[in-house]
Amino acid sequence: MQQIFLKPLATVSAALIMALVFSSSLMAADTEGTAAELASLLKSYETYQADFIQIVVNENGSKVQESRGSLKAKRPGLFYWETQAPLSQYIVSNGQSVEVFDPDLEQVTVHNLDDRVQTTPALLLSGEVDNLEDTYRVSGRQVGDDTREFTLEPKSEDSLFVSLRLTFFKNELQEMRMQDSLSQLSVLSFNDIKLNESVDDSAFTLEYPEDVDVIRDEG
């Protein structure tokens, strides 16, 4: 197994940021109350499991990719993401680091959970969500009786995404939407959702062949 060392966060896998989807509509004015409301919803998820369909759209509105997979999240800090073939990829967080395994490249990339990685949309389901207003401009709106939408815009110019929208139906996270810095739009729709069911910590481990290249950051 060859180990390669990189500068901190030279690149982060596109699947790690999950290219979730962007909403161009402006929501209600940012308030600490809206951020606290979102944090309360997310913190009520001790565990979150779902299958997903992810569609990526370019700046011209053309679909460039569709993938399917599953995810598991458990507080505090445990996360597992699997994308099915032909775009196979595995992402696992143990709360201290994130491992990304690309079977086709025979490569594992390991990143420390520094501040930049912690703004990854996926980690909202397993990481720290108190004081969201310190990191994001948070706005929200009600859609009908049962649907609530929140839009997060990172305050840091070094963020992995430009805008993120989370849609809840009866307090259950149904969809994430994100725009990245290249104006690429991605829609992540969840189904077969399981909330707060018991998940053993052993489910958040990554197994890969011993002969793959391991790329580590220096942070």
Image (tube, rainbow, N blue to C red):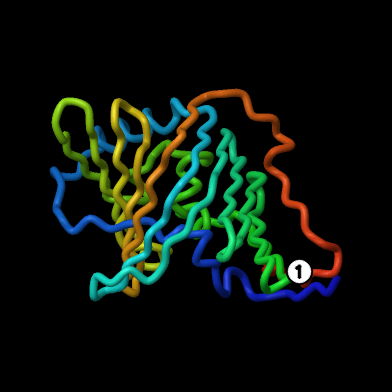
Which residue was labeled with disc 1?
A: 214
Residue 177 at x, y = what percent? 32, 53
Q: Which residue is drawn at 37% across and 71% down?
A: 64
Quarter of the rendering containing residue 75: top right
The N terminus appears in which quarter of the rendering? bottom right
Residue 158 at x, y = what percent? 41, 67
Q: Nearer the viewer, residue 186 or 24?
A: 186
Amino acid type of the residue tagged 1 in the rendering? Val
* 6 on left or right of 24: right
Quarter of the rendering containing residue 163: bottom left
Which SS class for mark 1? strand
Q: Nearer the viewer, residue 109 or 190?
A: 190
- Above or below, 201 relative to 108: above
* 112 on left or right of 38: right
The C terminus appears in which quarter of the rendering? bottom right
* 6 on left or right of 165: right
Q: Which residue is drawn at 69% across and 38% down?
A: 203
Residue 213 at x, y = what percent? 77, 72
Q: Residue furthest front?
A: 86
Q: Which residue is drawn at 53% across and 39% down?
A: 126
- Above or below, 139 relative to 157: above
Residue 9 at x, y = what percent? 58, 69
Please give the count of numbered marks on the rendered protein: 1
Q: Which residue is drawn at 24% across and 40% down?
A: 149
